[in-house]
Each structure stands twice: as structure tokens, then as C-alpha cells.
Image (cartoon, helix red, strand yellow):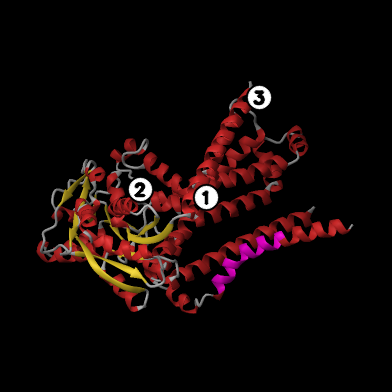
Amino acid sequence: MKDSGLFKMILASICGICVLFLISPIIALFTFPWAKSIDLILDSFVLQAVIVSLKSTFISLLIIMILGMPTAYYMARYSFKGKKIVETILQIPLVLPPAVAGLLLLVTFGRNGLIGKYISPFGIQLPFTFVAVVIAQVFIAVPIFIRAARDGFEKVDRELENSAAVMGASHLQVLYHITLPLSKNALITGAILSWARALAEFGATILFAGNLAGKTQTLPLAIYTAMEKDVNLSMGIAVCLVVVSIAVLVILKYITWYQEVEK
Amino acid sequence: MKVRLMKTISIIMTLLLIMVSGGCKSSQQAKASKQEINVFAASSLTESIEEVIALFEGENPKVKVKLNVDSTSRLRLQIEQGIQGDIFLSANKKHYDALKQEGYILKGQAILQNSMVVIVPKANLAHIETVEDLRNKCKLVLALREVPAGDYARVIIHSLGSEFGSGFEEKVLNNIVSEESNVKQVVNKVVIGEADAAFVYSSDVTESVKQNVKVLEIAPKHNVRAEYWTSKLSKGNENEYVEKFYAFLINKEAQRIFAKHGFNSIK
């Protein structure tokens, strides 16, 4: 009994160290005198970055869902030859350092790139464009959505789907009336997580899309750029992004809590 | 089959682990007996300062020089935020002066000069034959305005405007597709052929860069004279080698290395 108390204390103190380590930068951020940073945020290049970030992440999220949902559904419901390989490919961006991803996108879609050299004669040049921002974000964030959505689809009771099918529902009807509503929470979680990842995207964007205010400069790039000018300004942007990130976490917690209550 | 594969993999992993841990140990032991000095250098100095450091370390085997390369403005920020350094090499006088005024610099002097050139990729898809052609539609990459190289580029474009007439400056600035955070990034965008043109230091056109780019000179009356300042930082280490390295940068051998990389001596 005494032993288990000691054991628990050791665990608790190690856990405490982790919590302190992770929370201290956020405390530091809020103790920083960023009152004057708020004025600086209203600076036009930050507002431009907000707009670029919102626009690009919104488009990215749409593409991610359009591509990700069918992919996740296919992976959850069917087995085929080489499925393990496809699975691995779909997870590559998760383990790739984003800077490497950016470099790879550049040698793929750049003017002299593997694919880029065939499309650039038609006037489609991707690097340094807004489209490149979206491509970088989709590349980095789509695996997160696919994974979450696939988990959701797999948890749906197959019996329910089967009985609906037996009663004469078509594939699409089953999907729409049974599968999607039952995996709703997983899909929302996946969407929020992948959106947050797209919003945070830095390495691939700066390498593949460049850095131009109002065009390809997203918020994380704006922080990096602001470091050249004024540390107060970057701190201001950092505060905004921290608030957004924490909000994302809170929403996710709420969804999981809601899920448990529903059951 | 699978078992065999696993066995092979685990043997390879073990070997790798032993190699890595062995490597760590020896370098740690070497470190313990060595004095350390920290050098902060503007990114345009990368190759030349690496060579100077190698020479210095060769002559002073008891010293380990740690090099931190970034844009001058970012290095200044790091110094102001309390990251410890001993020697700071600035790509312009402005950041040097600011740090001196704030009390971070004990002493310093101008050591090198550099000028700017325009580089275009060998393929030259945008057909930029002279500096004046920059007004045509092309993908121009500059360093950020706050980075010395970006500041100089804008000064030059402004000055060229007086010769090439109205609208030149505006057209050129409209061609900017990206503002990079340091000059090496700018160079590489042209080297990989994604940018059509860029303003960089003449010293950035190293041997390996030369194979991929064409250099367009800028008339001296429009060009800038970039001055590099070396300085001894006030919050640095208290070891004798800092002073020694500071003096070393000014001596003939070091200056010869800098000259080889396209810098001019200040004297």
C-alpha cells in the first residue's frame, strides 16, 4: 500500500514536469508586454496574412474533404491487393518534415519538376502562387483527415448498414442515412484537426509558395517575416495563433464529451 | 522469410546504433578539452567564413568555433534576445550601429566590401539580357526589405529608375513573386530555376552557383557598396581566443579567403 502511494507520487511528479514544460511557453507568451503588439497587428501586412490564411485553409479544407472522404470510405470498407502499400503512402506526409515536403513539391511541380515541366508550357506555373499555398496545405493535412474519417467509418456498426441494404436501400442511401450520421463526430474532428494543421503549415509553404505579403504569405510566414522587423509584432501574431489553437482543442474536447453523453 | 528479414533489420539497426553512439562519445570527449567561441555571421559570408574558421581551427587546435549563420537582422534579434555570442559579422552598418548603441558591442570595425549583381538562370526563360529587361514580366525574387540584401536591392532599383525612366521602379517591384528571409534563399530560387531573376551579392555567385546562373552587372553609379562590420560582443565568453579570432579576421590570410569569394578588402 505504501509502495503504491510512492509509485503514484513519482508518476504525478513526472507528469507535473511535462505539464510545466508544455505550459511555460504559453505563460511566457501572455506575460510578454504585448499590449503594444495589438496595435501592430492591425498593420496591413498582418491583416493581409489573416485573409490569405483564412482563404487558403478554407479552400484546402474543402479539397481535403472532397478527396479525403471517399478515400477514407474506400479504405474502411474494401480490401484489395496492395492495401498496406496504399495505407503507407497515405501516411507519408505525417512523418515527412514539412521543409522536405516543400522541397519535394518544388522538384515535382516546379518549372523544371517531374510533373511541372509538362504543365508549365501551358502557362501553368505553380511555385510562388496562391495555388501553391493550397497544394502545400492539402499535401500536409489530408492524411490527418483520412485517418480520422477512416477510424470513424470503421466504428460504424456493419449490422446496421447491412440491414438497411437488405431492406432495399442503395449504397448512397446507406451512406447518407446511416454511415455519415453515425461517423459525424469523427468527420468533424478530422476536419478541425486537418484545418488546424493547414493553418499552422510553414515549412512546405515557404519553400514551395514563397513569401509575398497579400499573395502567399500566411500567418506563420508572417510571424517569420515579422521577426525581421519587430519582435513585438511577431509576438502579437503568436498570441492570435495560440488563441486559435487552444480554441480548436476546446472544441475537440467538447465534441468528444458530447459523444460520450450521447451514448 | 519474414523472420529472416526482421533479423537482418535488427542487426543493421544495432550496428547503426553502435556507430552513432560511438561517434557521439568521441566528439564529446574532444569537446571537453576544447575552448569554445561562438561566431554569428551574415548568411552571405557562409562559405568564406567556414573556410576562415577551418584555417583558424587548424592553427589553434584547442579551439572549437561554433558558427551561427542567418540574416543580419535575425542575428541582431538573437543577440538582443540574449543568445550568447562572441563575434558578430554584420552585412551592413545599420544593424552594427544599432547594437553598438544598445551596448551589445565592445568594439568593431569595417572589414569587407561587397556589391550587388543580378542573376538569372542559365535557361533564361524570361529573356533577361540586361538589367533594364527587369521591367518586362518576370518572376523576380528579392530578400525582405529588412534584410540588408533586400534593402540594397530596393535602393538600386530606385536608382536605376532615374536612368530607365518613369515606371521602371514600379514595374520591377510588381514583378516580385517572393521575399525571402535571407540572401542564400534568394540565390537558390534562381539556381533551381524557379525564379527568373534576383538581386544578390557578387560574393554569392560561388563556383557551384556559377554553373547554373548568368550574371548581369549593375553599373557602378547605381550599385551600392555594402560594408561588412566585424565586432566583439559584450556578453560573450571571456577566453583569449575570442580576441585572437577577432584579430585573425583582419589578417592577410583571412582577407585572402574573403577575396577569393568575391569580397573586396576595405583598405
Which mark lies nearer to you, 2 or 1? 2
Circle 2 SS class: loop
**Residue sitting at 61 percent across and 50 percent down?**
A190
**Chain ID for label 2?**
A
Q: Residue furthest right?
A: A1
Q: Which residue is mark 3?
A: B3
* Label 1, label 3: how far apart the Cα atoms are: 44 Å
Kindly report which numbered mark, 2 or 3, lies closer to the viewer in this rendering.
3
Instruction: Write the residue at 11% across / 59% down.
Output: B219
User: If the image is split into quadrants, where does the N terminus of chain B sit?
Assistant: top right
Q: CA distance from mark 2 to mark 3?
A: 46 Å
Mark 1 is surrounded, within 10 Å at the Cα level, by few (under 14), some (14 to 19) or many (20 or more) other residues, namely: some
Label 3, residues with CA under 10 Å away: few <14, some 14-19, many ≥20: few
Asked if the residue at tag 3 contacts the one at tag 2, i.e. Cβ–Cβ closer than 8 Å, the answer is: no
- Where is residue A51 shown, x and y percent of the image? 44, 63
Q: Tell me which amino acid carries mark 1.
A: Leu
Residue for badge 2: A127
Residue shown at 63% from the left, 27% from the top: B7
Find the magenta span and give its range. Answer: A14-30
